[in-house]
Amino acid sequence: MTVNRRATVARRSTAKSGCRTVVSRWARHPRCVALARAELSKVLDRWGLAEIADDALLVLSELLTNAVRHARVSRGREIETRYSREPNGLRIEVHDAAQNWPQPRMPDVHGGRGLTVVAALAACWGTEVRDGGVGKAVWAVVTAPDGGEV
């Protein structure tokens, strides 16, 4: 099976905040998690954020895996990732068109550890209504271990 990743990576600079953002769209397929991790790894290197790479990659993996597994939407709908440079780290967002919001649950043999891992590694995380009102964005901010600027 071939996984199609649309070449819709857009890099833009926001003059208001000075924040750089990378946006990508992914097919709802488990292989996209590894592709997104590879992309984020390159972004972290380019932005000089190697210090937070392990935590950021794991947070992305958990958020994107949740979207792939649980975002029941019509065929052809994509999942979007956004990585934004923050003064002391990185904001990771995963957008999907599903209406079901993630709920932390008690881990069992089938899973349930993802949001617990995100909460442990991220300085903060949350869920908000997606732009346009369809679906949601789950986000997390990963910062340097000492909370200082990276």
Image (spheres, helix red, strand yellow):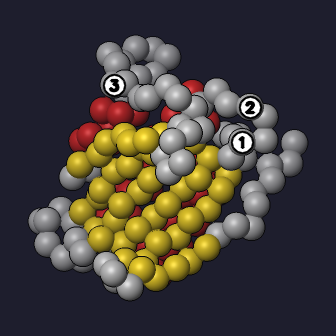
Tag 3: residue type? Pro
- How far is mark 2 from mark 1, CA to CA? 6 Å
Disc 3, SS: loop
Amino acid type at circle 2 is Ser
Give the number of callouts: 3
Percent of width and height locating residue 134: 56, 39
The residue at the point 59 percent across, 53 percent down is 80
* Image quarter hosting the C terminus: bottom left
Residue wearing tag 3: 104
> Tag 2: Cα neighbours inside 10 Å, few (<14), some, or many (≥20)?
few
> Which of the two residues, 91 or 18, is positioned nearer the viewer here?
18
Q: Report helix, strand or loop for mark 2.
A: loop
Which dot marks residue 60?
A: none
Tag 2–tag 1 contact (CB < 8 Å): yes
Tell me the residue at 45%/64% (across/down): 83
| Alpha carbon separation for disc pair 3 and 2 | 25 Å
The amino acid pointed to by label 1 is Arg
Can the viewer see residue 65 in this picture? Answer: no
Q: Is residue 127 left or right of residue 83?
A: left
**Residue placed farthest to the front in the image?**
132
Q: Nearer the viewer, mark 3 or mark 1?
A: 1
Q: Secondary structure at mark 1?
A: loop
Residue 26 falls left or right of residue 67: right
Q: Position of residue 61 (x, y in %)?
A: 49, 46
* Between marks 3 and 2 in the image, the one whose residue lies nearer the viewer: 2
Q: How far apart are the alpha carbons under marks 3 and 1?
A: 25 Å
Q: What residue sits right under mark 2 in the picture? A: 74
Q: Mark 1 = which residue?
A: 77
- Front in this rendered view, residue 113 or 9: 9
Task: Give how far across and how far down residue 47 sits, in percent.
Answer: 41, 80
